[in-house]
Amino acid sequence: MKPGDQASSREFGPLTRQMFVRYSGASGDFNPMHYDDELARSAGHPSVFAQGMFSAALLAGFAIDWLGAPSVRRFGVRFREQVWPGDVLTCAGTIVAVSEEDEVDRVSVELTATRQTGGVAITSTAEFAVPRSGPRNAAHGAAGPANQQ
């Protein structure tokens, strides 16, 4: 693993209102902006929209498929654009730094979830402690199943 290595990108979607409603139930976020079109329109939105944490969860899932859930040490996000029904999010990640620490590589990554319009919905920085003895993908240096063939 080295700076500049990238994960294979992954698409999620098209996203649906039903997904937003299901996430409301799973997360306990029952803000009606995510499932009531009339209310969302009355607040000036064209329709309901995804919970920020729903989109962040898709990006986090992408990251842990790449570098492994047990390896997560830090995961932070910044919400940049709304995500709407019908959107397709493409998640991508790049290694920006690697340092050796005991039996692991401390791997810092930058992640993005980009809408089909080209607008970036979420940016993220994350840090992983990836065991050096674990499985790796030669092309990407990744330990997670998303990049293993």
Image: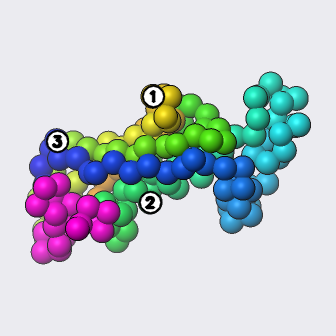
> Mark on residue 118?
1
User: Where does label 3 land, which residue?
Assistant: 4
- Asked if the residue under mark 3 is in contact with the one under mark 1, i.e. CB atoms within 8 Å, the reply is no
Q: Which residues are magenta?
A: 131-149
Is 141 contained in the magenta span?
yes
Q: Position of residue 113 (x, y in %)?
A: 45, 41
Q: Earlier in the sequence, mark 1 or mark 3?
A: 3
Hey, what amino acid is under mark 3? Gly
Q: CA distance from mark 2 to mark 3?
A: 21 Å
Please tell me whether mark 2 sits on a helix, a strand or a loop: helix
Asked if residue 57 is positioned above or below residue 97 in the image, the reply reads below
Q: Earlier in the sequence, mark 1 or mark 2?
A: 2
For the image, the number of numbered tags is 3
How many other residues sit within 10 Å of disc 2, few (<14), some (14-19) or many (≥20)?
A: some
* Residue 36 located left or right of residue 84: right
User: Is residue 13 found left or right of 32 in the rendered image?
Assistant: left
Q: How far across and how far down the image is residue 58, in percent?
A: 50, 54
Q: Residue at x 75, y 40 (%)?
A: 48
Above or below residue 28? Residue 134 is below
Question: Which residue corresponds to mark 2?
Answer: 61
Check disc 2 and give the amino acid type.
Answer: Gly
